[in-house]
């Protein structure tokens, strides 16, 4: 049976073209996406593109009447930043394609290896086309190890998430069902989100894929309709629409926290961003934010005036930074906050639903020691920093056997600080990384200083690449230690992971802020005042 006539997007990178795909010369293809471990159909994302990579197509599910579902995703920024795919329930799919050669790719988040199949649609309309089978293979099971993932910046609707969340194999998200952008607007009166106000109950797609439906974004860009850029802050996990306009921020934050919310700093580079941690208005810092996409990097001029000279971020003659520069800017900004004892836990947000990026491309993994998923415990762990963020690699850190989010008392003169002649004295640190791409750099971050680690041989994981590093770090005063790793795609794009810090408290010797960093943060606040 032919698909119903509909409009689909064919996107050459040089232009945006809308075309009716269900033409008389189009043929129907069908297929399934299978989990290699179970042999059963699995929810996943499907990308269909022409052999030259210039044109994308959407698919639909074709099974279980009333239960099968598909969510098309079509976003583009500029000529090259394109994300077009279909999230599918675990059912057969179908699509209509004109004659030609195509690549079909099934993916299911970073824990699975995607599968790509090439097909050809013949010009002969009577020719039979065999069904396509794509098989995704898990290379790491983070839930089995007690790690569960989340994306804190989501603009997909609750209805869409029932399909998209399992297709991304993302455990937790927070759809922003309240959204205002003017200093005079209240979510209770001026909501940009067009759906109904959801009830404050956890929505369980299944036992390990859930979302909390009542969340608010204040993305302030105007005052009484006139441009006045301030920035964005998210109130996640509250119970009722917030009846406050911002600024002032304080009353909104107080009311949101009274309802059980945690507050997320969207991006470090907004004009008001450094004011928010200074007044205690945020709990989370998006280490991987909504300018990091699977597709091409786009925002190379975003608030570039806030990049301080001391960070030494490379920029071209126009002042533009590249993707590694944007990542470095965000990390160094976070380190400055941590060094001033502003203890923001790392988070990850994509803004999927607005930007050309799949839900959960950047995600935060939260550790749950008993290896059983519980939403409330996950939320507590997110706020406490029992976590790492990633756009691909999986990264694990212990400091004196303590995991990220821990705070431990440390005596630099204790027996525990005495190492061997080869390793030297200091706190013992172990870092492990497992990933699908070659490891470019594995590093410790000690109070913002970068300590390169030697990348040893593989550690016997199923991952294509893995390594473990053991070292000792000399700690004489209160400090924090985190780990980070960088890899690259075949096209040279950065993929990275970063742990939350472990804090070491040395009695009588507090962590000292650095004047350059403290002055930078003060200057950011003064500039906005």
Image (cartoon, rainbow, N blue to C red):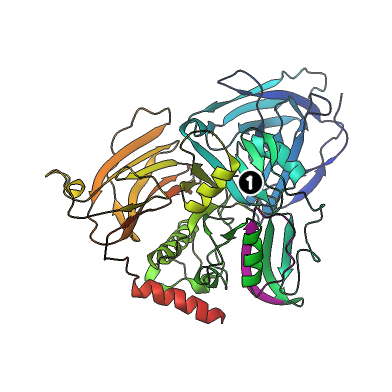
Task: Please name the residue shown 39% across and 29% down the image.
Answer: 461
* 100 versus 324 height, above or below: above
How many residues crowd mark 1 within 10 Å: few (<14), some (14–19), many (20+)?
many
Q: Please name the residue shown 57% across and 37% down the image.
A: 109
- Pinpoint residue 118: horizontal percent, then vertical percent: 63, 27
257 shown above or below 250: above
User: 381 above or below 57?
Assistant: below
Please indicate, yes or no, whether residue 68 appears anywhere in the rendered image: yes
Residue at the (32%, 59%) spot, across then down: 479
Q: Is residue 290 magenta?
A: no
Label 1 element class: strand
Residues 94 and 364: in front is 364
Residue labelled with disc 1: 173
Q: Quadrant of residue 394?
A: top left
Q: Which residues are magenta?
A: 227-247
Nearer to the camera, 520 or 45: 520
The N terminus: image quadrant: top right
Q: Could you tell me residue 259's position as x and y percent?
A: 66, 57
Q: Quadrant of the C terminus?
A: bottom right
């Amino acid at each position: 049976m032919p698909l119903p006539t509909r409009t689909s997007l064919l996107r050459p990178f040089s232009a945006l073209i809308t075309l009716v795909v269900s033409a008389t010369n189009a043929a129907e293809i069908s297929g399934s996406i299978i989990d290699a471990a179970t042999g059963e159909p699995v929810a996943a994302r499907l990308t269909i593109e022409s052999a030259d990579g210039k044109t994308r197509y959407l698919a639909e599910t074709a099974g279980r009447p009333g239960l099968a579902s598909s969510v098309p995703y079509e976003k583009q920024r500029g000529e090259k930043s394109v994300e077009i795919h279909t999230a599918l329930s675990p059912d057969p799919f179908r699509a209509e394609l004109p004659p030609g050669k195509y690549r079909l790719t099934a993916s299911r988040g970073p824990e699975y290896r995607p599968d790509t199949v090439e097909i050809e649609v013949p010009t002969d309309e009577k020719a039979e086309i065999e069904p396509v089978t794509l098989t995704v293979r898990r290379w790491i099971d983070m839930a089995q190890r007690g790690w569960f993932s989340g994306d804190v910046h989501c603009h997909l609707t609750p209805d869409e998430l029932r399909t998209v969340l399992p297709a991304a194999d993302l455990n937790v998200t927070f759809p922003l069902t309240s959204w205002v952008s003017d200093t005079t607007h209240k979510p209770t009166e001026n909501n940009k989100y067009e759906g109904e106000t959801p009830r404050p109950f956890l929505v369980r797609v299944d036992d390990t894929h859930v979302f909390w439906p009542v969340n608010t974004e204040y993305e302030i860009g105007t005052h009484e309709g006139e441009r006045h850029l301030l920035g964005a802050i998210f109130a996640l996990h509250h119970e009722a629409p917030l009846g406050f306009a911002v600024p002032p921020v304080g009353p909104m934050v107080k009311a949101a926290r009274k309802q059980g919310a945690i507050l997320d700093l969207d991006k470090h580079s907004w004009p008001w961003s450094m004011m928010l941690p200074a007044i205690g208005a945020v709990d989370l810092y998006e280490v991987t934010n909504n300018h990091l996409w699977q597709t091409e990097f786009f925002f190379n001029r975003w608030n570039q005036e806030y990049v301080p000279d001391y960070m030494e971020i490379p920029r071209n003659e126009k002042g533009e930074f590249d993707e590694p520069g944007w990542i470095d800017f965000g990390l160094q900004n976070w380190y400055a906050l941590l060094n001033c004892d502003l203890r923001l836990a790392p988070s990850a947000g994509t803004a999927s639903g607005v930007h050309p990026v799949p839900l959960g491309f950047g995600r935060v993994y939260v550790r749950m020691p008993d290896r059983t998923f519980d939403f409330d415990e996950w939320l507590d762990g997110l706020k406490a920093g029992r976590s790492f963020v990633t756009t691909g690699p999986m990264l694990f850190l212990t400091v004196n056997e303590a995991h990220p989010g821990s705070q431990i008392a440390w005596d630099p003169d204790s027996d525990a600080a005495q190492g061997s002649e080869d390793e030297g004295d200091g706190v013992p640190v172990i870092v492990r990384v497992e990933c699908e791409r070659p490891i470019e750099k594995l590093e410790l971050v000690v109070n913002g200083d970068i300590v390169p680690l030697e990348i040893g041989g593989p550690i016997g994981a199923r991952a294509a690449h893995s390594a473990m590093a053991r070292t000792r770090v000399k700690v004489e005063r209160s400090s924090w230690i985190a780990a980070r790793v960088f890899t690259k795609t075949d096209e040279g794009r950065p993929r990275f992971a970063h742990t939350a810090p472990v804090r070491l408290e040395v009695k009588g010797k507090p962590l000292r802020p650095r004047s350059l960093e403290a002055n930078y943060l003060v200057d950011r606040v003064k500039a906005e005042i």
